Image (cartoon, rainbow, N blue to C red):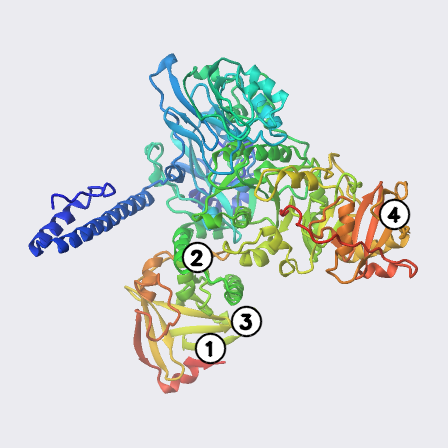
Amino acid sequence: MDDWKASPLIKPFGARKKRSWYLTWKYKLTNQRALRRFCQTGAVLFLLVTVIVNIKLILDTRRSITEASEDPEPEQDYDDALGRLEPPRRRGSGPQRVLDVEVYSSRSKVYVAVDGTTVLEDEAREQGRGIHVIVLNQATGHVMAKRVFDTYSPHEDEAMVLFLNMVAPGRVLICTVKDEGSFHLKDTAKALLRSLGSQAGPALGWRDTWAFVGRKGGPVLGEKHSKSPALSSWGDPVLLKTDVPLSSAEEAECHWADTELNRRRRRFCSKVEGYGSVCSCKDPTPIEFSPDPLPNNKVLNVPVAVIAGNRPNYLYRMLRSLLSAQGVSPQMVTVFIDGYYEEPMDVVALFGLRGIQHTPISIKNARVSQHYKASLTATFNLFPEAKFAVVLEEDLDIAVDFFSFLSQSIHLLEEDDSLYCISAWNDQGYEHTAEDPALLYRVETMPGLGWVLRRSLYKEELEPKWPTPEKLWDWDMWMRMPEQRRGRECIIPDISRSYHFGIVGLNMNGYFHEAYFKKHKFNTVPGVQLRNVDSLKKEAYEAEIHRLLSGAEILDHSKNPCEDTFLPDTEGHTYVAFIQMEKDDDFTTWTQLAKCLHIWDLDVRGNHRGLWRLFRKKNHFLVVGVPASPYSVKKPPSVTPIFLEPPPKEEGAPGAAE
Amino acid sequence: MLTSSQNVPVFLIDPLILELINKNSEQIKNTSYGTTSDCKFFCVPRDFTVFALQYHLWKNEEGWFQIAENMGFQCLKIQSKDPRLDGIDSLSGTEIPLHYICKLATHAIHLVVFHERSGNYLWHGHLRLKRHIDRKFVPFRKLQFGRYPGAFDRPDLQQVTIDGLEVHIPKDLVHFLEEIPHSRFIECRYKEARAFFQQYLDDNTVEAMAFRKSAKELLQLAAKTLKKLGVRFWLSSGTCLGWYRQCSIIPYSKDVDLGIFIQDYKADIIIAFQDAGLPLKHKFGKVEDSLELSFQGKDDVKLDIFFFYEETDHMWNGGTQAKTGKKFKYLFPKFTLCWTEFVDMKVHVPCETIEYIEANYGKTWKIPVKTWDWKHSPPNVQPNGIWPISEWDEVIQLY
C-alpha cells in the first residue's frame, strides 16, 4: 500500500474515515498483486465518488442554509456565482498606495491584470482584434470601462477617439493591441494617442504589438512596443509591468451640489466611464428632463417596457431620448436587462428608473425571445390594471412626439379588433419615401421597433403559446406568422417615431445597418396633430383607399419605374402604378421595385391588401399589385401592369433579421 | 400628524379607529361634528396609527422620506423583492417598499404599502426585520399589519373629516373590517414549481393548453358566481395540488375542484350556477351528510364542489359511488383559509396546505400520477357504509 499515492484531485476532508475502514477490509481480504491493483483502482474510484458525494452534500447544505436564512440577499448569491471582479487589493494605505498593472499584447492573446486580478483576457480566435482600452478609477483602481476598437476596420478609430475624449481627466488608461490595430488607425486617432503622451501609438504599424499605461492628461506610466519584422508576421509579444500610484478620492470626484440627483450622478460617475458630459465636473448634462406634460394624455398610465441586453451606452442614449419625450411618465418605465450585467443597471439607476435583471438558469433559456416573454409577463404583472404596454428596445431613439402619437391613436386598439398593434416604425419610411408626419397607414406586417401591445392579445393568445426555448424562432418573426397575426393589421405612421441606431447586436452588422436603417426618416417635430385618425378603422380605411385611388393620376406604365423620371417633378400629387402580382404571395415585381427604390426589400413589408403607400418627390405614390389586390378594379383596361424580372439567383443578402 | 401635504396617496386602515368610526358613523356624516379642538378618534391611546399607501398612485417617493425626517420623524423603511416577478423565469430587480414606520416621540405612524396585483386586489408584504435593524425602534409585536403578507379587495374610498382632519377611509367599512383578520396571504411556491418543471417538463401540447384555458375560465366563472352569493370557497383536491406543486392547472386533471364549508351552503347555489351557464351534472348526498355537487362546464370540463364537515379534531368531505350507493369519507386535519393568487385571481387555499395535500395525496404528492382512483387512491379515504335504498332518489341524482 505504501506505493499508492492519492490523486491530487482528491481532497482529504470527508473521505478519510471511509478510507480507513475500506483499507482494513481490503488487507484482510488479499495479498495477491493483481487483485491488489484491482482494489487500488477501485479504491481510487470509490474515494472519488465519496468526495464528490461529500462536496455535493456540503454544497446542498450550504444552499439550504442560505435559503433558510432570515433575509436572503440574492444579489450576493449572484456575486459569488459569477465571481465578479473584486476591487483590487491595495498595497499599504495613505497617499503612497500603488497598483501593479500588467499588460500583455500579442498576435493571439491580450490580457490586463491589476494587482494580480485579471481584468481582461482575450485569446479567442477570430475575435477581439484591434485596440483594447481599459479605464481605471485613479482613486480606487476599479475598472470603469472596457472597450475594444477594431481599428483594422474602417471608422472604428473614430469611435475610439469619441470614447477617449469622453474619459475624464486623471483616469488611468490602459491600451493593448491584439492581432492588428493599425490598418484603419487614421491621423486624428494617432494625434490623440500622441496627446496622451504615447510614443509608439502614433507610430503603430502593421501587426505591431503595443501595450500602454498612462493617466489621461499625463503622465505616461509605461509603454512597450514591438515592430512587426515583415508583412506576413507579427511583432513579438510584449509584457508591460508597471506601478500606478493611486490618488486620493477627493481628487477623483467632482464637487457637485448635494442633491438627490447629484447623488445618483456621483454613484454612476465613480463606477463607469465613457458617458461624456454626464460626469463633467464643471457643466454636467442634466439627468432629469421634465419635458412638457401632454394635454389629455391617454397613455400616461400605460407601462413602458424597455428590452435591453448588455449595451449600456445604447441604453443611455435610448433612455435620454425616452425621458425627453413629451408626456413620458418615468414611474411607468421598467428596463428589463437580459443577463446579470452591472453597467446597464447603473445606467438605469442614474435615471432613477426601475430595472429588472433576467438571469435564466440555463444558457439555452438565454434566447432573446425568452427574455421578451419574461419582460412582457412581468410588465403586465407589475401593472395589473394596464390594458396596454409600450415595448421598446435599447437601440432606439424615441421621437419627441412618441407619446403624443400614441395618445392620439391608442383608442383604435380598443375600438377595432382587426388591429394587431400600433407601431412607431414604418419599414418603408426612408428619407426619400416618407413625407407626412400627420399621416397613418394600416399594414399587414408587424414592424416592431417601438410598439403597443394589447394585454388581451398577450395574455390570451401569445403568452400561452410563446415559442419555447428549444424552438429557434425569433420572437418578432414568430409574431409575424399568420397563425399569430390572424389577418390583423398594425397602425404605423408615415414618418417613424423611433429611430433604430443599433449596430452591434445579435441581429445586426454594420453594412446591413448602413444600407437599411441609417437613411430612415425620424420625426423631430413636437406636438404633431395626426390627421383623421378614425379613418384608420377597418371599414373607414377601405373607403379612404378607394377615395385615394379614384383621385390618383395614373403614371406612364411604359417608363422604367426604377428611373427617377417615372414620377413627374410635381409636389402634392397622388400617383398610382400597377405592378404584376399573380397571387397574394407573389412579390416578384414588388421586391425588384423595392430594390431599385432603395427601400426595404429583404422581405415584404408595409403592404395592405396588395397595396403599398409611400412618397416620391413629395408626391403620394401608390403601388397596386394586379390582379391579386382587390384594388385592381381601379386599373383601366388599357394599362398593362409592370413586370420586373428578378436577377439570376446569387448569394442572398447579408443574413439578418429585423 | 399627517404627511398628507406631500400628496402621499394614503387611506386609513387602523382597525381601532375604523371600528370607532363605524360605531359613530351617524355622527361623522353630520358635518358640524368634530372640530379641530375635538379629538375623539385620533387621540384614543395606542402605539400606532396605520395607513395604507397606494403605491401605484405615488409619484414623489424619493422626496417624501427626506421631508418626513425634516419634520422630526424617525423613519424605518422595510423593502423586499417584488413577488410579482417571482412567478417568472428568474427575474430580479429593484426592491419595492413594503412598510414605512415613522415615529415621533412615543407615537408611530405605520404606512403599509399596498401594491396592485393581478386579480384586481391589493397586496401588502410581510414586515420582516433584517438583522441590522433595531428591534426596539417601536414595539413591533403590537403592529396590526405585517405579521403576514395580506390581500384585500380593492376598496372604494370616501373622504371624511375626523377630529378636524380630512382622511380617506374605505367606503364599505364593515366589509373592510371583516377582511382584516382573514387577510393572510401566501405566495405560490414559484421556485419549487420551476424545479418541478425542470424535472418533469411542462405539457405544452395544444390539448393541454386548451384544457388550461377552459379550466381557468371555469374557475373564474365559479369564483364570480360564488362571490356574488357571498359563499367562501377554496381550491381543493387536484386544483389545490396544481397550485401548490406547479403554480398552474394540472393539464390531465380534467376537472376543477373546490371546497366549501357546509355551514356556508346556500340553497340557491345550484340555480346561480345554472344561471351562469353551468348546469348541474350530479348531486350526491344531502346537506346533513356527504353533500357533493358537480356542474358541467364548457369543453367537457367539470366543476366539482365538495362540502366539508367539521368535527372536533378533523374535517371531512363525503363521496358516493353512483352505481352501488357506497359512501366514502375523506379525512383532513383541521385547517384555516388563506388568500393566494392563482391564474390571475385572488382565491382561498388552506393555510396549512402541506398537511391538506399530504392527507389527500400522501407524502409522494410531488410525483405526478396520471391514473387516480378517487375511491381507493387517496390515503385519507374511508368506507362510510352505504346509502339506504329508500334515500337513493334524493342522494344520487344524475343529470
Please state which of residues B144 and B67 is positioned toward the viewer in this rendering. Answer: B67
Query: Farthest bottom residue?
Result: B390
- Tag on residue A178? none
Q: Which residue is mark 2?
A: B247
- Tag on residue B282? 1
Q: CA distance from mark 2 to mark 3?
A: 23 Å
**Amino acid found under the numbered disc labelled 2:** Cys
Please state which of residues A170 and B254 is positioned toward the viewer in this rendering. Answer: A170
The residue positioned 44% from the left and 57% from the top of the image is B247
Q: CA distance from mark 4 to mark 2?
A: 58 Å
Q: Earlier in the sequence, mark 2 or mark 3?
A: 2
Label 3 and label 4 in one chain: no
Secondary structure of the residue carrying numbered label 4? strand
**Amino acid found under the numbered disc labelled 4:** Thr
**Amino acid found under the numbered disc labelled 3:** Asp
Q: Earlier in the sequence, mark 3 or mark 1?
A: 1
Q: Is residue A372 among the parts visible in the rendering? A: yes
Secondary structure of the residue carrying numbered label 1? strand
- Tag on residue A574? 4
Chain of the residue on which disc 4 is drawn:
A
